[in-house]
Image (cartoon, rainbow, N blue to C red):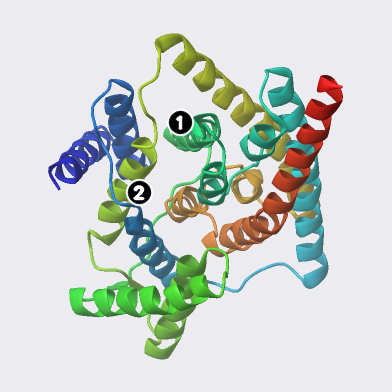
Amino acid sequence: MMIWLRTCALGTAGGWLAHRAGFPSDWLLGAMLIVALAAMAGLDVRLPKFLLAPIQACLGVAVGLRLEFDFPAPSSLLFSVTGLLLCLATQIPLGQYMLRRLGWSSQEAVMGASPGALSIMAALATQLDNPIRVILSQTVRVIALVALVSVIMLLEWVPTLNTPASQELSLTTTVLLVLVTWVVGRGAAWLRVPASYILAGVAISAAYAAWAGVSAVPVDGLIPVSMILLGALVGSRLKPLPAKEMGQLLLVGLLISLSSSVIALGWAVVVAWWLDLPVFQVWLAYAPGAVEAMIYLALVTGLEPSWVIFHHVLRILLLGLCAGWLMRRAGAGESITNEQGKA
């Protein structure tokens, strides 16, 4: 309990400092960086994994209250999804090739090259003798992407959201929405629905907003608290290692993040030009980051979060369906190679 309280205190301090300094994505970025630095310095920081479900539920509720069904025509949406598939088909093989050249095993390369779906890859990585490479690579990618987007917003290269006049929900109503979302999301998770808590939150809060007939926002403080906890959860995944090994893994994570982000930007430019959409909006939908972080970034910009959540959930579904098969295939190929080497 003391370790959890310490981690929350560090995350809160980092988020508050970033908020006072005027950084975009302040609560998320500040909490994540402070806790990550503490972890790399050898301080024992961690939070229980079960917090991720209520965090996702809160984020889903916030998105659902703003949900708008102003997607392009079906043909345009199909073009965008095709762009996402081509983006994945480019990112994954390149990432695997780079990691294999750096000495990673086939299974490590499969999971380390996955553009996002950190929780799924981290769960699969527990089957390895040493999952630290995969977890650290994926975590560094999330941190790097959030930091990059924060810099872009700080330089005012993208619009920030001018929040329209909205009715603030009471604490009771907000808590009830989150609780219902958690229950429904838990049932959907049992059915193995990807991003179940986020999807449940979006559906339930959107239905509530439609029934109430007014524009609404969650009770003040819900998003900052959720982002502090999310940032602390991500940052605490970094564990102390020998300086040389830690430096190498950080560089690898940054390298994969950079290559995947550049590829995503290339496809985003094509799709945005064709559909006459903001490039940054499409890039957020294609970016190889955690769905919670990317949706939050869409929430705090002048862009449409429903567009971003659709593409990220689709990507998580595809990666979740393919990751296990790719990992088994890579393991089988590695076994054959080892047997041939012994022969």
In percent of width and height, residue 128 lies at 57, 38
The residue located at (50%, 73%) in the rendering is 190
Mark 1 vs mark 2, foreground winner is 2
Please state, as top left, top right, bottom left or bottom right, where the C terminus lies in the image.
top right
In percent of width and height, residue 192 lies at 57, 69
Q: Marks 1 and 2, how far apart in space?
A: 20 Å
In percent of width and height, residue 30 lies at 30, 35
Toward the bottom, the furthest residue is 211
Is residue 89 toward the left or the right of residue 19 in the image? right
Task: Please name whichever residue, 29 or 209, is drawn nearer the observer in this view of the structure.
Answer: 29
The relative height of residue 122 versus residue 98 in the rendered view (above or below) is below
Residue 38 visible here: yes
The relative height of residue 274 versus residue 101 in the rendered view (above or below) is below
The numbered mark, 1 or 2, whose residue comes first in the sequence reads 1
* Local crowd size for mark 1, using a 10 Å CA cut-off: few (<14), some (14–19), many (≥20): some
Which residue is under mark 2? 230
Kindly identify the amino acid type of the residue bearing the numbered disc 2: Leu
The relative height of residue 313 versus residue 256 in the rendered view (above or below) is below
In percent of width and height, residue 267 lies at 76, 42
Is residue 342 toward the left or the right of residue 15 in the image? right
Is residue 336 toward the left or the right of residue 226 in the image? right
The relative height of residue 318 versus residue 31 in the rendered view (above or below) is below
Give the mark count. Answer: 2
Kindly identify the amino acid type of the residue bearing the numbered disc 1: Val
Which picture quadrant has residue 68?
bottom right
The residue located at (77%, 27%) in the rendering is 97
* Local crowd size for mark 2, using a 10 Å CA cut-off: few (<14), some (14–19), many (≥20): many
Whether pointer 1 and pointer 2 mark residues with C-beta atoms closer than 8 Å, the reply is no
The residue located at (29%, 38%) in the rendering is 31
Which residue is under mark 1? 151
Specify the label residue 311 is tagged with: none
